[in-house]
Image (spheres, helix red, strand yellow):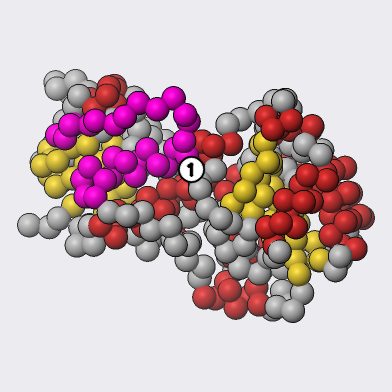
Amino acid sequence: MEKNFLVFSNGEKIGDGIIKLQLLHEIKKRFPDHKLIWMTNKGNTVYNNQLKYLASYYIDNIIEKANLNPFFWNKISSNYDLNDVFYEYIFDTQKAIYRTVALKRIKCKNFLSSAGNGFLSSFRLNFKKNNTRKYYLNDLFDLLNILKMDTIDNSFRITIPENLQNGLEEIFNRNDKYLGIAPGAGEKNKIWPLEKFIELGKHFEKNNFKIVLFLGPNEMSIKDRLLSEFPEALMPEKIIKSFSNIEIVMGSTKFLTCALANDSGISHMLSTKYCPLIKLFGPKDSNKFTPEHANLKFISSSQFNSSDVKVIPVEKVIKVIEDSIS
């Protein structure tokens, strides 16, 4: 009988999808002879879209928008025939009890979920209560350890396609120093002032760094200003056309000396561990969204007794960057 491992979520946007790539890596490492199926309930997953190429290293099949129903008199799924499907493992990554009850209707040998303190699970969950908020992927690793204990592979790095790397080598010079800057974010209260990004960029330009700009669709309004301040800045996404913008940002980190970003989707793309990344936080919790790794550091407005990211001084950011690349 084919061995199947089903992972259930309610959908992934780009940042969440990038973070969970390490979870996919861990599952495949621990269950290499299992077919990995990724299922979403209502939402879409970037594993079937922008991150389809990278996810294909791990995921064998995707069931998107299963629309599960918890009531026994209805079909399990309105979009798929799941009544006679059997999985050896079902791994629930979300915590909404209503969705977990619906998921439980699918036949399986081992069911694991932390929803409702794990009362529907095949395994006893005995996590120690800790009031300290930790990186949220660690909660999923704790669950995975219940199925099969193993050491987390902290050397994990996202695979960069060879053709993309070859294209980037034509843009970047290995003998030069590059500072990547991502000055935007989807929420305005997460954005460090543009003037501070410019002041910092000027400092590093004087120290023989070349500026690399990473701009999302909401940052096009500041593009002209930035290019007027940094006329020689590189924008790899405007040069390479054969890969998605997301893949290009992630691939560029193999050539950056360091990167600086607000708490944003682009910051997740820059979190490949190939170069030091400094993330600026305020007002959200930096611990929850920053994994523990030597190449990833954060500066939070809470360090300056404020929830406003604008209070973070340029001098502090410059020092952290210089310490990271020394």
**Which is nearer the eye, 294 or 94?**
294
From this viewpoint, is residue 244 visible? Answer: no
From this viewpoint, is residue 21 visible? Answer: yes
Q: Left or right: where does residue 120 sit relative to residue 24?
A: left
Instruction: Give me the residue at 52% from left, 53% from top.
Output: 293
Instruction: Give me the residue at 31% from left, 47% from top.
Output: 38
Residue 326 in which image quadrant: bottom right
Residue 265 at x, y percent in the picture: 60, 44
Q: Is residue 125 found inside the magenta-colored segment of the image?
A: yes
- The count of marks equals 1
Q: Residues within 10 Å of mark 1 (few under 14, many from 20)?
A: some
Instruction: Give me the residue at 29% from left, 60% from top.
Output: 29
Q: Is residue 48 found inside the magenta-colored segment of the image?
A: no
Residue 320 at x, y percent in the picture: 72, 51
Q: Quadrant of the N terminus?
A: bottom left
- Residue type of the residue flagged with mark 1: Asp
Q: Classify 164 as above or below 290.
A: below
Residue 242 at x, y percent in the picture: 59, 68
Residue 61 at x, y percent in the picture: 29, 54
Residue named by callout 1: 16
**Which is nearer the eye, 247 or 94?**
94
Q: Classify 84 as above or below 321.
A: above
Span highlighted in magenta in the image = 121-149
